[in-house]
Image: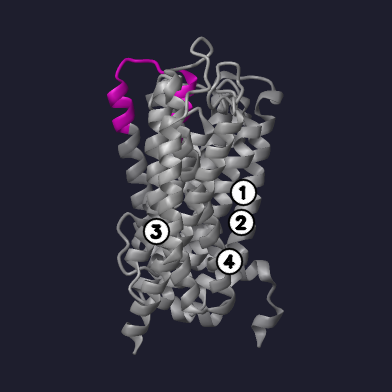
Amino acid sequence: MPEKSVGWASKVLAVTAKDITTEFRTRYAVNAVVMFALVTLTAVSFALGLLQPSSEILAALFWVILFFAAMSGLAYSFIREEQSGTGLILRLSASGSVVLFGKMFFNFLLLLALTVLIVPLFMIFLKASPQDWPLFIAGVVLGDIGLAGATAIIAAIVSRATIRGALFTVLSFPVLLPLLVASIEISKVGFTGGNFSEIAAPMQLLVAYDVVMIVLSWLLFDFVWRR
Amino acid sequence: MWWKLIIFAGMSAVIIAAFVTPSPMNPENSLGPVDIYRVFYFHVPQAWIASLAFIVSMIYSIRYLRTRDIRYDIRAATANRLGLIFAILATVTGSIFARMTWGEFWNWTEIREVSIFVLLLIYGGYFALRAAVADPDTRANLAAVMSIIFAVAALFLIFVIPRVYGAFTQHPTDSIIDRGGQITMGPTVRIIFFGSLAVFTALFAWIYRLSVRVADMKYRAETE
Protein backbone atom coordinates (compact mmCIF):
# COMPACT_ATOMS: atom_id res chain seq x y z
CA MET A 1 0.00 0.00 0.00
CA PRO A 2 1.40 3.38 -0.89
CA GLU A 3 -0.33 5.03 2.11
CA LYS A 4 2.11 3.45 4.51
CA SER A 5 4.99 5.49 3.17
CA VAL A 6 3.02 8.72 3.49
CA GLY A 7 3.82 10.58 6.69
CA TRP A 8 1.25 11.56 9.32
CA ALA A 9 1.58 15.28 8.62
CA SER A 10 0.95 14.95 4.90
CA LYS A 11 -2.15 12.85 5.61
CA VAL A 12 -3.41 15.63 7.89
CA LEU A 13 -2.76 18.15 5.12
CA ALA A 14 -4.58 15.89 2.66
CA VAL A 15 -7.71 15.99 4.85
CA THR A 16 -7.39 19.78 5.08
CA ALA A 17 -6.94 20.05 1.30
CA LYS A 18 -9.99 17.84 0.75
CA ASP A 19 -12.04 20.09 3.04
CA ILE A 20 -10.84 23.21 1.23
CA THR A 21 -11.83 21.70 -2.13
CA THR A 22 -15.31 20.72 -0.94
CA GLU A 23 -15.67 24.08 0.78
CA PHE A 24 -14.96 25.89 -2.48
CA ARG A 25 -17.71 23.89 -4.20
CA THR A 26 -20.47 25.12 -1.89
CA ARG A 27 -18.75 27.93 0.04
CA TYR A 28 -21.23 27.32 2.87
CA ALA A 29 -18.91 27.76 5.88
CA VAL A 30 -17.06 30.73 4.39
CA ASN A 31 -20.31 32.50 3.56
CA ALA A 32 -21.82 31.80 6.98
CA VAL A 33 -18.77 32.94 8.92
CA VAL A 34 -18.04 36.05 6.83
CA MET A 35 -21.64 37.21 6.58
CA PHE A 36 -22.23 36.61 10.28
CA ALA A 37 -19.13 38.61 11.16
CA LEU A 38 -20.12 41.45 8.82
CA VAL A 39 -23.67 41.58 10.18
CA THR A 40 -22.52 41.61 13.80
CA LEU A 41 -19.82 44.18 13.07
CA THR A 42 -22.30 46.45 11.30
CA ALA A 43 -24.84 46.05 14.09
CA VAL A 44 -22.24 46.90 16.73
CA SER A 45 -20.76 49.93 14.98
CA PHE A 46 -24.19 51.21 13.93
CA ALA A 47 -25.52 50.88 17.48
CA LEU A 48 -22.50 52.73 18.88
CA GLY A 49 -23.01 55.60 16.41
CA LEU A 50 -20.78 58.49 17.37
CA LEU A 51 -19.71 57.02 20.71
CA GLN A 52 -16.02 56.28 21.01
CA PRO A 53 -15.77 53.18 23.22
CA SER A 54 -12.82 52.65 25.55
CA SER A 55 -10.22 49.98 24.80
CA GLU A 56 -11.82 47.57 27.33
CA ILE A 57 -15.11 47.76 25.44
CA LEU A 58 -13.41 47.55 22.05
CA ALA A 59 -11.59 44.36 23.07
CA ALA A 60 -14.79 42.80 24.40
CA LEU A 61 -16.77 43.75 21.26
CA PHE A 62 -14.06 42.39 18.99
CA TRP A 63 -14.19 39.00 20.69
CA VAL A 64 -17.97 38.90 20.76
CA ILE A 65 -17.97 39.38 16.98
CA LEU A 66 -15.25 36.78 16.44
CA PHE A 67 -16.86 34.28 18.82
CA PHE A 68 -20.32 34.37 17.24
CA ALA A 69 -18.94 34.35 13.70
CA ALA A 70 -16.86 31.29 14.61
CA MET A 71 -19.90 29.59 16.15
CA SER A 72 -21.87 30.05 12.93
CA GLY A 73 -19.46 28.07 10.73
CA LEU A 74 -16.93 25.94 12.63
CA ALA A 75 -19.27 22.99 13.16
CA TYR A 76 -19.90 22.65 9.47
CA SER A 77 -16.78 20.69 8.47
CA PHE A 78 -17.96 17.71 10.53
CA ILE A 79 -21.68 18.13 9.89
CA ARG A 80 -21.02 18.08 6.13
CA GLU A 81 -19.49 14.59 6.39
CA GLU A 82 -22.63 13.26 8.07
CA GLN A 83 -25.03 15.07 5.74
CA SER A 84 -23.36 13.96 2.53
CA GLY A 85 -22.73 10.45 3.88
CA THR A 86 -18.97 10.66 3.36
CA GLY A 87 -18.20 10.08 7.05
CA LEU A 88 -17.93 6.30 6.70
CA ILE A 89 -15.48 6.51 3.81
CA LEU A 90 -13.40 9.01 5.75
CA ARG A 91 -13.38 6.60 8.72
CA LEU A 92 -12.11 3.82 6.48
CA SER A 93 -9.43 5.83 4.73
CA ALA A 94 -7.90 7.80 7.60
CA SER A 95 -7.22 7.31 11.31
CA GLY A 96 -9.03 9.37 13.91
CA SER A 97 -6.15 11.67 14.74
CA VAL A 98 -5.55 12.46 11.05
CA VAL A 99 -9.19 13.49 10.61
CA LEU A 100 -9.22 15.50 13.84
CA PHE A 101 -6.08 17.48 13.08
CA GLY A 102 -6.97 17.89 9.40
CA LYS A 103 -10.29 19.46 10.30
CA MET A 104 -8.80 21.46 13.14
CA PHE A 105 -6.30 22.94 10.68
CA PHE A 106 -9.06 23.65 8.15
CA ASN A 107 -11.05 25.50 10.83
CA PHE A 108 -7.92 27.40 11.84
CA LEU A 109 -7.38 28.54 8.23
CA LEU A 110 -11.04 29.55 8.04
CA LEU A 111 -10.67 31.63 11.22
CA LEU A 112 -7.43 33.15 9.93
CA ALA A 113 -9.16 34.25 6.72
CA LEU A 114 -11.98 35.68 8.81
CA THR A 115 -9.47 37.55 11.00
CA VAL A 116 -7.69 39.03 7.97
CA LEU A 117 -11.03 40.37 6.75
CA ILE A 118 -12.55 41.48 10.03
CA VAL A 119 -9.59 43.20 11.74
CA PRO A 120 -9.19 46.05 9.18
CA LEU A 121 -12.98 46.54 8.97
CA PHE A 122 -13.23 46.63 12.75
CA MET A 123 -10.51 49.28 12.96
CA ILE A 124 -12.15 51.40 10.23
CA PHE A 125 -15.74 51.17 11.46
CA LEU A 126 -14.98 51.62 15.15
CA LYS A 127 -12.18 54.17 14.56
CA ALA A 128 -9.82 52.10 16.65
CA SER A 129 -6.11 51.64 16.20
CA PRO A 130 -4.11 49.26 18.39
CA GLN A 131 -1.04 50.91 19.89
CA ASP A 132 0.74 47.59 19.82
CA TRP A 133 -0.08 45.83 16.52
CA PRO A 134 2.24 42.77 16.94
CA LEU A 135 0.80 42.03 20.37
CA PHE A 136 -2.78 42.44 19.14
CA ILE A 137 -2.17 40.12 16.18
CA ALA A 138 -0.35 37.56 18.35
CA GLY A 139 -3.29 37.52 20.77
CA VAL A 140 -5.81 37.07 17.97
CA VAL A 141 -3.83 34.25 16.33
CA LEU A 142 -3.42 32.41 19.66
CA GLY A 143 -7.15 32.88 20.21
CA ASP A 144 -7.88 31.49 16.74
CA ILE A 145 -5.75 28.42 17.51
CA GLY A 146 -7.72 27.88 20.71
CA LEU A 147 -11.08 28.42 18.99
CA ALA A 148 -10.24 25.90 16.26
CA GLY A 149 -8.52 23.47 18.65
CA ALA A 150 -11.18 23.34 21.36
CA THR A 151 -14.23 23.28 19.10
CA ALA A 152 -13.18 20.56 16.62
CA ILE A 153 -14.19 17.70 18.93
CA ILE A 154 -17.38 19.54 19.94
CA ALA A 155 -18.23 19.84 16.23
CA ALA A 156 -17.71 16.08 15.87
CA ILE A 157 -20.04 15.49 18.84
CA VAL A 158 -22.70 17.84 17.44
CA SER A 159 -22.48 16.22 13.98
CA ARG A 160 -23.64 12.93 15.52
CA ALA A 161 -26.67 14.45 17.25
CA THR A 162 -30.06 14.06 15.58
CA ILE A 163 -31.22 17.60 16.34
CA ARG A 164 -28.46 20.17 15.94
CA GLY A 165 -29.91 23.69 16.14
CA ALA A 166 -27.95 25.88 18.52
CA LEU A 167 -26.31 22.88 20.20
CA PHE A 168 -22.81 23.80 19.00
CA THR A 169 -22.93 27.26 20.61
CA VAL A 170 -24.50 25.92 23.81
CA LEU A 171 -21.77 23.30 24.22
CA SER A 172 -18.88 25.52 23.11
CA PHE A 173 -19.50 28.57 25.27
CA PRO A 174 -18.65 27.08 28.72
CA VAL A 175 -15.58 25.42 27.18
CA LEU A 176 -14.39 28.63 25.47
CA LEU A 177 -14.95 30.95 28.44
CA PRO A 178 -11.33 30.76 29.75
CA LEU A 179 -10.09 31.48 26.21
CA LEU A 180 -12.36 34.51 25.87
CA VAL A 181 -11.28 35.92 29.24
CA ALA A 182 -7.58 35.65 28.35
CA SER A 183 -7.99 36.85 24.75
CA ILE A 184 -9.99 39.93 25.72
CA GLU A 185 -7.31 40.78 28.27
CA ILE A 186 -4.54 40.53 25.65
CA SER A 187 -6.50 42.53 23.05
CA LYS A 188 -7.16 45.22 25.65
CA VAL A 189 -3.42 45.67 26.22
CA GLY A 190 -2.96 45.52 22.43
CA PHE A 191 -5.29 48.50 22.04
CA THR A 192 -3.81 50.64 24.80
CA GLY A 193 -0.22 49.56 24.40
CA GLY A 194 1.65 48.51 27.50
CA ASN A 195 4.66 46.60 28.59
CA PHE A 196 5.03 42.88 28.34
CA SER A 197 4.68 42.16 32.07
CA GLU A 198 0.99 43.14 31.88
CA ILE A 199 0.09 40.38 29.44
CA ALA A 200 2.56 37.68 30.50
CA ALA A 201 -0.06 35.96 32.69
CA PRO A 202 -2.96 35.89 30.17
CA MET A 203 -0.49 34.89 27.45
CA GLN A 204 0.67 31.89 29.51
CA LEU A 205 -2.93 31.01 30.28
CA LEU A 206 -3.88 31.18 26.60
CA VAL A 207 -0.95 29.02 25.46
CA ALA A 208 -1.63 26.48 28.23
CA TYR A 209 -5.34 26.40 27.31
CA ASP A 210 -4.56 25.84 23.60
CA VAL A 211 -2.15 22.98 24.36
CA VAL A 212 -4.38 21.29 26.95
CA MET A 213 -7.51 21.48 24.80
CA ILE A 214 -5.79 20.15 21.67
CA VAL A 215 -4.20 17.24 23.58
CA LEU A 216 -7.49 16.45 25.34
CA SER A 217 -9.36 16.44 22.01
CA TRP A 218 -6.75 14.11 20.57
CA LEU A 219 -7.09 11.71 23.55
CA LEU A 220 -10.90 11.66 23.45
CA PHE A 221 -11.52 11.87 19.72
CA ASP A 222 -11.67 8.12 19.01
CA PHE A 223 -14.59 7.73 21.44
CA VAL A 224 -16.58 10.20 19.35
CA TRP A 225 -15.42 9.19 15.89
CA ARG A 226 -15.40 5.37 15.97
CA ARG A 227 -18.72 3.56 15.87
CA MET B 1 -36.69 3.21 55.52
CA TRP B 2 -34.18 3.97 58.29
CA TRP B 3 -32.35 6.37 55.98
CA LYS B 4 -35.51 8.35 55.44
CA LEU B 5 -36.18 8.73 59.17
CA ILE B 6 -32.61 9.65 60.05
CA ILE B 7 -32.46 12.29 57.28
CA PHE B 8 -35.85 13.65 58.33
CA ALA B 9 -34.76 13.99 61.96
CA GLY B 10 -31.36 15.44 61.01
CA MET B 11 -32.78 17.94 58.54
CA SER B 12 -35.41 19.10 61.01
CA ALA B 13 -32.78 19.53 63.71
CA VAL B 14 -30.55 21.57 61.35
CA ILE B 15 -33.40 23.81 60.18
CA ILE B 16 -34.61 24.51 63.73
CA ALA B 17 -31.09 25.04 65.06
CA ALA B 18 -30.21 27.33 62.16
CA PHE B 19 -33.03 29.70 63.04
CA VAL B 20 -33.21 29.62 66.84
CA THR B 21 -29.53 29.91 67.80
CA PRO B 22 -28.48 33.48 68.58
CA SER B 23 -26.44 35.29 65.95
CA PRO B 24 -22.74 35.30 66.83
CA MET B 25 -22.20 38.48 64.84
CA ASN B 26 -21.34 41.83 66.24
CA PRO B 27 -23.76 44.34 64.61
CA GLU B 28 -20.99 46.94 64.24
CA ASN B 29 -18.67 44.60 62.43
CA SER B 30 -21.32 43.07 60.19
CA LEU B 31 -21.59 43.71 56.47
CA GLY B 32 -25.38 43.32 56.56
CA PRO B 33 -28.19 42.45 58.95
CA VAL B 34 -26.85 40.19 61.70
CA ASP B 35 -29.25 37.38 60.80
CA ILE B 36 -28.20 37.11 57.15
CA TYR B 37 -25.46 34.62 58.05
CA ARG B 38 -28.16 31.96 58.61
CA VAL B 39 -28.52 31.43 54.88
CA PHE B 40 -24.99 30.09 54.82
CA TYR B 41 -26.06 26.95 56.71
CA PHE B 42 -28.04 26.04 53.57
CA HIS B 43 -26.17 27.83 50.81
CA VAL B 44 -22.74 26.27 51.34
CA PRO B 45 -24.03 22.65 51.59
CA GLN B 46 -26.07 23.20 48.40
CA ALA B 47 -23.01 24.46 46.52
CA TRP B 48 -21.03 21.53 47.92
CA ILE B 49 -23.64 19.02 46.71
CA ALA B 50 -23.66 20.66 43.26
CA SER B 51 -19.90 20.11 42.99
CA LEU B 52 -20.09 16.63 44.54
CA ALA B 53 -22.71 15.58 41.97
CA PHE B 54 -20.48 16.87 39.19
CA ILE B 55 -17.55 14.80 40.50
CA VAL B 56 -19.72 11.66 40.92
CA SER B 57 -21.00 11.98 37.36
CA MET B 58 -17.42 12.58 36.16
CA ILE B 59 -16.26 9.29 37.75
CA TYR B 60 -19.15 7.38 36.18
CA SER B 61 -18.54 9.02 32.78
CA ILE B 62 -14.94 7.81 32.80
CA ARG B 63 -16.05 4.34 33.92
CA TYR B 64 -18.60 4.30 31.11
CA LEU B 65 -15.94 5.10 28.50
CA ARG B 66 -13.76 2.29 29.86
CA THR B 67 -16.44 -0.41 30.10
CA ARG B 68 -19.26 0.73 27.74
CA ASP B 69 -21.72 -0.43 30.40
CA ILE B 70 -24.91 1.61 29.97
CA ARG B 71 -25.63 1.42 33.73
CA TYR B 72 -22.72 3.77 34.39
CA ASP B 73 -24.26 6.26 31.98
CA ILE B 74 -27.53 6.06 33.92
CA ARG B 75 -25.60 6.88 37.11
CA ALA B 76 -23.75 9.80 35.52
CA ALA B 77 -26.98 11.30 34.16
CA THR B 78 -28.78 10.84 37.49
CA ALA B 79 -25.99 12.55 39.42
CA ASN B 80 -26.03 15.45 36.96
CA ARG B 81 -29.80 15.83 37.20
CA LEU B 82 -29.56 16.18 41.00
CA GLY B 83 -26.53 18.46 40.61
CA LEU B 84 -28.55 20.78 38.39
CA ILE B 85 -31.26 21.14 41.05
CA PHE B 86 -28.74 21.87 43.80
CA ALA B 87 -26.81 24.29 41.56
CA ILE B 88 -29.99 26.29 40.92
CA LEU B 89 -30.72 26.37 44.68
CA ALA B 90 -27.13 27.41 45.46
CA THR B 91 -27.24 30.18 42.81
CA VAL B 92 -30.49 31.61 44.18
CA THR B 93 -29.47 31.49 47.85
CA GLY B 94 -25.99 32.80 46.96
CA SER B 95 -27.47 35.69 45.04
CA ILE B 96 -29.64 36.68 48.02
CA PHE B 97 -26.64 36.30 50.30
CA ALA B 98 -24.55 38.52 47.99
CA ARG B 99 -27.27 41.18 47.86
CA MET B 100 -27.40 41.39 51.65
CA THR B 101 -23.66 41.40 52.31
CA TRP B 102 -22.10 43.00 49.21
CA GLY B 103 -25.09 45.03 48.03
CA GLU B 104 -25.51 43.40 44.62
CA PHE B 105 -27.43 40.37 43.46
CA TRP B 106 -24.79 39.56 40.91
CA ASN B 107 -21.15 40.43 40.44
CA TRP B 108 -19.06 39.07 37.58
CA THR B 109 -15.78 39.81 39.33
CA GLU B 110 -16.52 37.27 42.07
CA ILE B 111 -15.07 33.92 41.00
CA ARG B 112 -17.49 31.83 43.07
CA GLU B 113 -20.50 33.39 41.40
CA VAL B 114 -18.92 32.97 37.98
CA SER B 115 -18.06 29.32 38.61
CA ILE B 116 -21.53 28.36 39.86
CA PHE B 117 -23.01 30.09 36.82
CA VAL B 118 -20.69 28.21 34.48
CA LEU B 119 -21.64 24.99 36.31
CA LEU B 120 -25.28 25.79 35.45
CA LEU B 121 -24.32 26.38 31.80
CA ILE B 122 -22.45 23.07 31.77
CA TYR B 123 -25.43 21.18 33.20
CA GLY B 124 -27.66 22.92 30.65
CA GLY B 125 -25.35 21.93 27.79
CA TYR B 126 -25.11 18.36 29.09
CA PHE B 127 -28.88 17.88 29.07
CA ALA B 128 -29.31 19.73 25.76
CA LEU B 129 -26.85 17.23 24.24
CA ARG B 130 -28.62 14.22 25.80
CA ALA B 131 -31.97 15.47 24.50
CA ALA B 132 -30.55 15.89 20.99
CA VAL B 133 -29.27 12.32 20.52
CA ALA B 134 -31.76 9.53 19.86
CA ASP B 135 -29.66 6.36 20.08
CA PRO B 136 -28.96 5.41 23.76
CA ASP B 137 -25.39 4.13 23.20
CA THR B 138 -24.37 7.12 21.09
CA ARG B 139 -25.99 9.41 23.65
CA ALA B 140 -24.08 7.80 26.52
CA ASN B 141 -20.83 8.00 24.60
CA LEU B 142 -21.12 11.62 23.52
CA ALA B 143 -22.38 12.78 26.92
CA ALA B 144 -19.44 11.11 28.68
CA VAL B 145 -16.87 12.70 26.35
CA MET B 146 -18.52 16.09 26.62
CA SER B 147 -18.56 16.04 30.41
CA ILE B 148 -14.81 15.34 30.49
CA ILE B 149 -14.20 18.33 28.21
CA PHE B 150 -16.48 20.47 30.39
CA ALA B 151 -14.62 19.37 33.52
CA VAL B 152 -11.22 20.39 32.10
CA ALA B 153 -12.57 23.78 30.98
CA ALA B 154 -14.11 24.27 34.43
CA LEU B 155 -10.75 23.48 36.06
CA PHE B 156 -9.19 26.26 33.96
CA LEU B 157 -11.87 28.67 35.00
CA ILE B 158 -11.95 27.87 38.71
CA PHE B 159 -8.31 27.24 39.48
CA VAL B 160 -6.21 28.95 36.80
CA ILE B 161 -7.99 32.23 36.06
CA PRO B 162 -8.18 33.48 39.68
CA ARG B 163 -4.44 32.94 39.97
CA VAL B 164 -3.81 34.88 36.77
CA TYR B 165 -6.07 37.82 37.59
CA GLY B 166 -5.87 39.04 41.14
CA ALA B 167 -8.80 41.36 40.42
CA PHE B 168 -11.03 38.41 39.59
CA THR B 169 -11.55 37.80 43.30
CA GLN B 170 -12.43 41.29 44.38
CA HIS B 171 -13.83 40.22 47.69
CA PRO B 172 -11.62 38.78 50.40
CA THR B 173 -11.86 35.06 49.85
CA ASP B 174 -12.93 34.26 53.41
CA SER B 175 -15.34 37.09 54.10
CA ILE B 176 -18.46 34.98 54.30
CA ILE B 177 -19.64 36.85 57.33
CA ASP B 178 -17.33 39.44 58.71
CA ARG B 179 -16.16 42.85 57.58
CA GLY B 180 -12.69 41.99 58.83
CA GLY B 181 -12.45 39.08 56.38
CA GLN B 182 -12.89 36.46 59.09
CA ILE B 183 -15.32 33.60 59.35
CA THR B 184 -16.52 33.92 62.91
CA MET B 185 -17.29 30.29 63.49
CA GLY B 186 -17.94 29.67 67.15
CA PRO B 187 -18.51 26.11 68.36
CA THR B 188 -22.31 26.35 67.92
CA VAL B 189 -22.04 27.66 64.37
CA ARG B 190 -19.47 25.01 63.60
CA ILE B 191 -21.64 22.14 64.86
CA ILE B 192 -24.72 23.31 62.94
CA PHE B 193 -22.71 23.97 59.78
CA PHE B 194 -21.00 20.58 59.68
CA GLY B 195 -24.25 18.91 60.74
CA SER B 196 -25.96 20.59 57.81
CA LEU B 197 -23.18 19.46 55.43
CA ALA B 198 -23.59 15.86 56.66
CA VAL B 199 -27.40 15.93 56.40
CA PHE B 200 -27.31 17.45 52.90
CA THR B 201 -24.78 14.83 51.78
CA ALA B 202 -27.00 12.07 53.19
CA LEU B 203 -30.02 13.60 51.47
CA PHE B 204 -28.16 13.63 48.18
CA ALA B 205 -27.04 10.01 48.63
CA TRP B 206 -30.60 8.94 49.45
CA ILE B 207 -32.26 10.70 46.48
CA TYR B 208 -29.44 9.53 44.23
CA ARG B 209 -29.87 5.86 45.21
CA LEU B 210 -33.62 6.01 44.74
CA SER B 211 -33.31 7.73 41.33
CA VAL B 212 -30.73 5.20 40.16
CA ARG B 213 -33.01 2.34 41.19
CA VAL B 214 -35.93 3.84 39.29
CA ALA B 215 -33.78 4.55 36.22
CA ASP B 216 -32.34 1.01 36.28
CA MET B 217 -35.85 -0.48 36.45
CA LYS B 218 -37.02 1.76 33.60
CA TYR B 219 -34.04 0.69 31.52
CA ARG B 220 -34.71 -3.00 32.17
CA ALA B 221 -38.40 -2.59 31.36
CA GLU B 222 -37.50 -0.90 28.06
CA THR B 223 -34.93 -3.48 26.97
CA GLU B 224 -36.89 -6.60 27.90
At label 1, counting other C-alpha atoms closer than 10 Å, the crowd grade (few under 14, some 14-19, many 20 or more) is many
Nearer to us: label 3 or label 2: 3
Label the magenta part by its dominant secondary structure. helix
User: Can residue A99 be seen at all in this image of the molecule?
Assistant: no
Whether label 1 touches label 2, CB < 8 Å: yes
Q: Amino acid at mark 3?
A: Arg
Residue B214 appears in view: yes
* Residue designated by label 2: A214
Q: Which mark is residue A160?
A: none
* Residue A116, above or below B84: above
Mark drawn on residue B81: 3
- Tell me which amino acid carries mark 2: Ile
Write down the residue under mark 1: A210
**Chain containing the residue with disc 2:** A
CA–CA distance between discs 3 and 2?
29 Å
Q: Residue at x 37, y 83 (%)?
A: B220
| Marks 3 and 1 close (CB-CB < 8 Å) | no
Direction from residue A169 to residue B30 in the image, left or right: right
Q: How far apart in space, not on screen, are marks 1 and 2 (Cα)? A: 6 Å
Q: The disc numbered 3 marks a residue on which chain?
A: B
Give the residues in magenta: A42-63
**Which residue position is annotated with label 4?**
A220
User: Is B68 covered by the magenta stretch?
Assistant: no
* Residue appearing at x 36%, y 57% in the figure: A167
Callouts 4 and 1 close, C-beta under 8 Å: no
> Quadrant location of the C terminus of chain B?
bottom left
Separation of disc 3 and disc 1 at Cα?
30 Å
Tag 3: Cα neighbours inside 10 Å, few (<14), some, or many (≥20)? many
Q: Nearer the viewer, residue B175 or A192?
A: B175
The local crowd at label 2, few if under 14, some if 14 to 19, many if 20 or more residues have their Cα within 10 Å, is many
Q: Quadrant of the N terminus of chain B?
A: bottom left
